[in-house]
Image: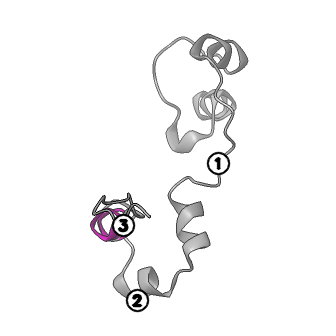
Amino acid sequence: MKAAAGVKTAGPEPFPWAHVIHAGLCLLRLDPKTFWAMSPREFHAMTGGAMPKVALPLAELMARYPDDGDGVLAPCGRGRDFNILAKG
């Protein structure tokens, strides 16, 4: 009845193609063939949509995963054990 009275109703938002193409080709650096071959579900997972919706506070994350305190990153992410072996 609203349409007959000349009142516009809110319709669905247009698909954000510019954002999706930017995320796939620029941020994820996918080649166009791979990008266009992906399913919407695959793209959703690659852009973080499949991540758990649980957010831990920073203090809890810092307590769970403490740094070793020296502020230096271990080569190749191998951790403290690699540094000990490399010295000796």
Instruction: Quickly name the residue at label 3.
Output: 3
Query: Which amino acid lies under the numbered mark 1 shown in the image of this protein?
Result: Met
Query: Which amino acid lies under the numbered mark 2 shown in the image of this protein?
Result: Lys
Q: Secondary structure at mark 3?
A: loop
Magenta span? 16-24
- Label 3 to label 2, Cα distance in Å? 43 Å
Q: Residue at x 65, y 20 (%)?
A: 61
Q: Residues within 10 Å of mark 3 (few under 14, many from 20)?
A: few
On the image, the x and y values in percent for residue 80 come to: 64, 27
Which image quarter holds the C terminus?
top right
Asked whether the beta carbons under mark 1 and mark 3 sit within 8 Å of each other, the answer is no
Query: Which amino acid lies under the numbered mark 3 shown in the image of this protein?
Result: Ala
Q: Secondary structure at mark 1?
A: loop
Asked whether, in this view, residue 67 is left or right of residue 5, the answer is: right
Mark 3 vs mark 2, foreground winner is 3
Instruction: Quickly name the residue at label 2.
Output: 33
